Image (cartoon, helix red, strand yellow):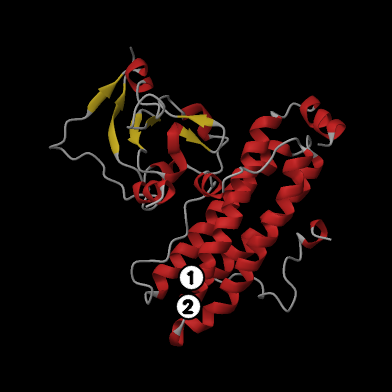
Amino acid sequence: MAKVAREMVEKAGVNVDELIELLVKNASAELTTYYYYTILRANLIGLEGEGLKEIAEAARIEDRNHFEALVPRIYELGGKLPRDMTDFHDISACSPAYLPDDPTDIRAMLTVLVEAERCAVRGYSHICNLTAGKDHRTYDLALSILHEEIEHESWFSEFLGEGPSGHFMRRGETSPFVSKFLR
Amino acid sequence: MRASSLLLMRYPSDPVPTREPTATMAMQRFTKEELAQYDGVHSERILIACQGKVYDVSRSFLWQKGKHQALHRAGCDLTPFLKDAPHGLDLLQRFPVVGILVED
């Protein structure tokens, strides 16, 4: 644990135990989403599905990166991950992104994907709001993840016909915002 | 079957479709004390209130054991917290309304 770092956050008025719980729940959401997106990606096939496979893969890899980036901060603040993986799954900040009953229904697949991203956008916006001006390191981390989650949401939203995403897909590298926490 | 599998079956998806009470459904009236009984810790049924309506969130993955996102507890009126939440009333409206919150 980074004792002084935790003290500074507490002194700034943040309930650190609640913050840790939120970070653990969001770390769970990232890792479980990585798992569920693996299944979704495998089922994105055919004329419509193949076109989505690349962005689903980019979102999947970046969600795993988010998990990796969150874990050090949890331990720095004095928290820890649950010992049991099943417990970890069940405390996720977002609902499981299950494969739709009809995996050939691409619109249903996109709805699962966009809802998962929207849950993440809400979650990191909340953490940013709680830590802004108080816990600079967690804020920076949550903001970096938020940037990527918003881009994921906009990719899937575009395919649902809700309007242009406003930017391009990744070109080669993943996690343009979070990579600084992974070095 | 593992316990976690059973748990997932209990929370098939989130959110669930809205089921607003119809004219034929009696609108149950809850006082704050009555609402507090459905906190998800002492009851299986999990209820929350917001802006005068009582919502049943028992089937929500995000309200397991009556706790939501580390910060909120079921069995009470969450209206004051909505302004700071990263979502609006629209998300709550996806859950069944089972009554109204009344003064004691």
Quadrant containing the N terminus of chain A in the rendered view = top right
Q: Is residue B38 above or below residue A60?
A: above
Give the residue displayed 81% in from the left and 41% down from the top: A136
**Position in image of residue A177 (x %, y %):** 76, 61
Q: Which mark is residue B54?
A: none
Mark 1 vs 2: CB contact within 8 A: yes
Q: Is residue A116 above or below residue A73?
A: below
| Amino acid type shown at disc 2 | Leu
The residue singled out by tag 1 in the image is A40
Give the residue displayed 71% in from the left and 31% down from the top: A16
Disc 1 crowd rating (10 Å Cα; few below 14, some 14-19, many 20+) is: many
The residue singled out by tag 2 in the image is A44
Q: Is residue B32 above or below residue B49?
A: above
Give the residue displayed 15% in from the left and 37% down from the top: B23
**Position in image of residue B20 (x %, y %):** 26, 42
B52 or A109, nearer to the observer: A109
What is the residue that sits farthest to the front in this orientation?
Answer: B1
Q: Is residue A101 above or below residue A53?
A: above
What is the residue that sits farthest to the right in this orientation?
Answer: A4
Q: Quadrant of residue A168?
A: bottom right
> Does residue A126 appear anywhere in the picture?
no
**Position in image of residue B75 (x %, y %):** 40, 25
